[in-house]
Amino acid sequence: MRPAALTLVGALALLPNLMAAPATAWDRQVKQGETLARTNCAKCHAVGRVGASPLREAPPFRELHARYPVEDLGEALAEGIRTGHPSMPEFRFDPDQAEALIAYLKTLER
């Protein structure tokens, strides 16, 4: 093989490793978001792909994207979510946690 061909073969051999790194970071972020949802929200909301919310007026997380773009929740999650009904506590997440929760919500879109 010529040197250029060897370089190309070497680069192609590394490609799967380079492509796997972002997926791993995304997977960790999604897992952190799922943990936040289960820890802070599952008492009232259905936070998975199936099931009813324990609190009837709390929308299942898998339906939130139909109400508004979940990407727009970042600021509200960081500043504190407040709603009109008295039973929902105020939640405030740091920016990384807000991003993780949004990443998890995106995985629930159909």
Image: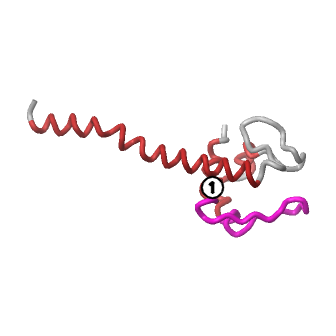
Q: Position of residue 85 (x, y in %)?
A: 89, 60
Q: Is residue 107 above or below residue 101?
A: above
State the SS at label 1. helix
Q: Please name the residue shown 28% across and 35% down the image.
A: 13
Residue extending furthest toward the left: 2
Image quadrant for the C terminus?
top right
- Magenta stretch, main secondary structure class: loop
Q: Tell me, what colour scheme is on the image? A: secondary structure
Q: Is residue 107 above or below residue 90?
A: above
Answer with left or right where residue 13 lies relative to residue 64.
Answer: left
Give the amino acid at mark 1. Glu
Answer with left or right where residue 83 lies relative to residue 15.
Answer: right
Q: Position of residue 35 (x, y in %)?
A: 67, 49
Q: State the image quarter where residue 15 is shown.
A: top left
Residue 85 on the magenta span:
yes
Answer with left or right where residue 17 lies relative to residue 67.
Answer: left
Q: How many marks?
A: 1
Q: Badge 1 is on which residue?
A: 71
Q: Position of residue 78 (x, y in %)?
A: 67, 66
Q: Position of residue 18 (x, y in %)?
A: 36, 44
Please provide the residue range marked out in magenta: 75-97
